[in-house]
Amino acid sequence: QRPVIISTDPGIDDSIALLLALASPELDVRAVCINFGSLHNTSQLAQNALDILALAGREDIPVFLGATDPISQPFHDLGGPKFHGTDGLGGVRLPHSRATVNTSVSAVEFIVHACRSWQPAPLLVSLAPLTNVALALNLDPKLPERCPDLFLMGGTVAAPGNVGPMSEANIANDPEAAARVLSAGFNTQVAALDVTMASWLPPKFLASLRDLPNDAGPFIWQSTRFYERAYETIGGFEGGMPLHDPTTLLLYLKPELYQLHRWPVTVDTSQYPSVSRGILVVDRRGGPKSPPPPDTDKVHFPMQVDVAGVQEFLLSRLR
Ligand code: BDR
């Protein structure tokens, strides 16, 4: 079992990712760290995390408060509530958890402490803007040596963006943090829109979750009603939903479902409201005459996915 720390902004698809992690015996979820993102209101995001943990009977897992704003620039609403609702869970109220946020340390201090002292080192998973991880790097620049493995959802390589022509919400919400983290030397896997959009869950799949004989399935069904409608009205899709945040965990749990490419990447940090702010600039030239990426470049992008395999595995875990 690998200990895992999840930085998240729950979030409808974050909830599915959390439930997937909790249902996976390979993972020992030790902490949930809140980062602003789908909402600016981190107290609401923390309550959502607590309530989802309670739904799964895991009120023992601590929730820590993390970044409330981007690392160096002001927060701008990029439209998170349109996809997640003003409460982050599409208006579905879960029973209120009896647990409360752990205020003994901040999320960022917790990440640094865990990376310094845990054996084996925790897997770092980020389902939100990368602010918590960037702040942890500021506190401990050796973080990538201590905690080498980072799995994150964010960005796009060649697919259209979701908050700009080529920009994705998690990266665009804090491009300076993303630039810091992606150049830090973590062994990184990036669930970018190329593969999360390709992993589209059709309405029939979502209906099969509604009928699961546990609390998680019906909750996912209810909250994804909002998400599905948002993709229909704002995104122009007809039914179903993309699989953003859960893909981050699937990359760890079922690597054989994906084909990875290692490419150098930089992040556009031009000033808001530049149309290119938050774009990942992925150098895919890689032809026979261009040099391979230097060994210090450890950022991997899955580009192909076995969609049927994803659905089968996800359903078996959520069941
Ligand atoms: C990302 O943005 C959030 O709205 C989702 O939860 C996901 O992390 C997708 O761009």
Image (cartoon, helix red, strand yellow):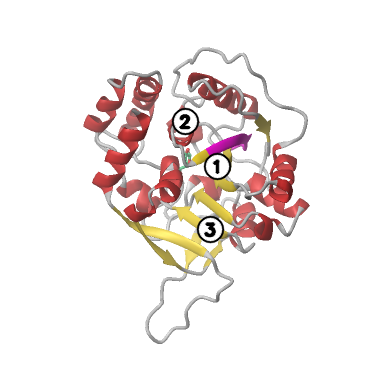
Residue 100, image quadrant: top right
Going 34% across and 37% down the picture, which residue do you hit? 314
Q: Earlier in the sequence, mark 1 or mark 3?
A: 1
Q: Quadrant of the C terminus?
A: top left
Q: Which residues are magenta?
A: 28-37
| Secondary structure of residue under mark 3 | strand
Question: Which amino acid type corresponds to the residue marked 2 in the rendered image?
Answer: Ser
- The reply to whether the residue tagged 1 has its Cβ within 8 angstroms of ligand 1 is yes
Q: Residues within 10 Å of mark 1 (few under 14, many from 20)?
A: many
Residue 9 % position (x, y): 56, 35
Q: Nearer the viewer, residue 133 or 91?
A: 133
| Secondary structure of residue under mark 2 | helix
Q: Residues within 10 Å of mark 3 (few under 14, many from 20)?
A: many
Q: Which residue is mark 2?
A: 15
Residue 163 % position (x, y): 46, 46
Residue 58, image quadrant: top right
Q: Which residue is mark 1?
A: 128
Q: Earlier in the sequence, mark 1 or mark 2?
A: 2
How many labels sit on residues?
A: 3
Residue 26 % position (x, y): 47, 42
Whether residue 146 is situated above or below residue 209 in the rendered picture:
below
Numbered tag placed on residue 18 in the rendering: none
Question: Which amino acid type corresponds to the residue marked 3 in the rendered image?
Answer: Thr
Q: Which residue is mark 3?
A: 188
Q: CA distance from mark 2 to mark 3?
A: 22 Å
Question: Which amino acid type corresponds to the residue marked 1 in the rendered image?
Answer: Ala
Q: CA distance from mark 1 to mark 3?
A: 15 Å
